[in-house]
Image: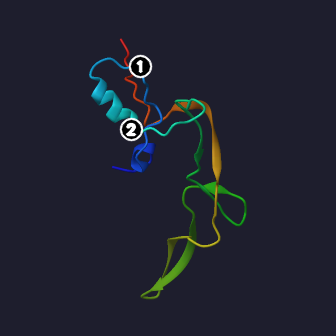
């Protein structure tokens, strides 16, 4: 599907050296990890916003304007989607942090 995580770039930041089993498989897993000085947290605190601001400062996913169309002598109102003069929302802080998409965890509820 999408290449939104770190696996798309060939590194796996959540790998751990403490894993049982075959040492050759552990070495192959560790080959994908870049050596870092600090641990990577499994949480995501911000995301890119999916909404836009228009010229008036209104915030929404989509904007429409009403246009009057005359067809066969009858006036009819149509909605036309606005694509110009929209400003992206930018970075949005997540109130409760989310678990990163590439973090290998199984969520279980009884």
Q: How many marks?
A: 2
Frontmost residue, 38 versus 56: 38
Which of the image's four quarters has the C terminus?
A: top left
Q: Residue 16 vs residue 95: left or right? A: left
- Mark number displayed over residue 18: 1
Q: Residue 109 vs residue 64: left or right? A: left
Q: Residues within 10 Å of mark 1 (few under 14, many from 20)?
A: few
Instruction: Give the residue displayed 40% in from the left and 46% down from the top.
Output: 10
Quarter of the view holding residue 30:
top left
Q: Residues within 10 Å of mark 2 (few under 14, many from 20)?
A: few
Q: Position of residue 11 (x, y in %)?
A: 43, 42
Q: Determine whether 93 is above or below 73 in the image.
A: above
Frontmost residue, 101 versus 75: 101
Q: Determine whether 57 is above or below 82 in the image.
A: above
Frontmost residue, 27 versus 61: 27
Residue at label 2?
31
Q: How is the image coloured?
A: rainbow
Q: Residue 76 vs residue 47: left or right? A: left
Q: Position of residue 61 (x, y in %)?
A: 55, 56
Q: Position of residue 95 (x, y in %)?
A: 63, 32
Instruction: Give the residue displayed 43% in from the left and 36% down from the top.
Output: 102
Q: Earlier in the sequence, mark 2 or mark 1?
A: 1
Instruction: Give the residue displayed 64% in from the left and 49% down from the top.
Output: 91
SS for callout 2: loop
């Amino acid at each position: 599907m999408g290449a939104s995580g770190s696996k798309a770039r060939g590194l796996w930041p959540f790998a751990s050296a403490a894993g049982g089993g075959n040492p050759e498989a552990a070495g192959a897993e560790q080959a994908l990890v870049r050596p870092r000085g600090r641990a990577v947290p499994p949480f995501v605190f911000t995301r890119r916003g999916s909404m836009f601001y228009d010229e008036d400062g209104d915030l929404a996913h989509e904007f429409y304007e009403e246009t009057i169309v005359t067809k066969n002598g009858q006036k009819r109102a149509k909605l036309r989607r606005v694509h110009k003069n929209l400003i992206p929302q930018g970075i949005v802080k997540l109130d409760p942090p989310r678990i990163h998409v590439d973090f290998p965890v199984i969520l279980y509820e009884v």
